[in-house]
Image (cartoon, grey):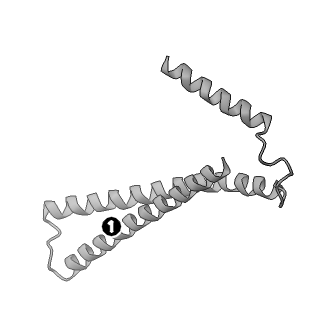
Amino acid sequence: MLDRREERAERRATHIGKLRKRAAEADAKLKRLYDAIENGIADLADPMLKDRIAELKAIRDQARADAERAQDAIERLGPSISRRRSRRSPEPPANASAPKPGVIVAITSAHSLNALKWT
């Protein structure tokens, strides 16, 4: 379960990186448009330019907001993962290969709930 949680956190971290990259790309495009306007290459009165600037701002702002939300979610989950890991003993117990009763109950309950969904 901890491994799955770690994998999920890694996927979220990758997703956050992609969102931040998308925001940075939108920022770079906006900067190029602003430079073009300042240098007289683009006309600010052009309605298509105004639409494009608004679109890039929306993309940038949405990507930043999504990245912040995802980062907050990881930070909320992070301490619980590390706390649980720190409680683990460094060496597995002698009967580590035997399934624990709590695990058996959890698996059985999960299978039962899935079976109920399909009926």
Amino acid at circle 1: Ala
- Image point (60%, 28%), residue name: 111
> Hey, which residue is sitting farthest top in the picture?
119
Q: Nearer the viewer, residue 35 or 82?
A: 82
Residue 47, image quadrant: bottom left
Q: Nearer the viewer, residue 1 or 60?
A: 1
Quick check: 29 above or below 82?
A: below
Q: Residues within 10 Å of mark 1 (few under 14, many from 20)?
A: many
Q: Secondary structure at mark 1?
A: helix
Would residue 11 be found to the left or right of residue 103 on screen? Answer: left
Residue 15, how many percent across, how many down?
A: 46, 58
Residue 31, how many percent across, how many down?
A: 30, 75
Q: Which residue is mark 1?
A: 26
Residue 5, how many percent across, how many down?
A: 62, 50
- Image point (86%, 51%), residue name: 94
Residue 64, how many percent across, how many down?
A: 44, 60
- Image point (49%, 16%), residue name: 119
Would residue 91 be found to the left or right of residue 76 on screen? Answer: right
**How many marks are shown on the rendered structure?**
1
Q: Nearer the viewer, residue 8 or 67?
A: 8
Quick check: 81 above or below 117?
A: below
> Hey, which residue is sitting farthest bottom in the picture?
39
- Image point (53%, 61%), residue name: 13
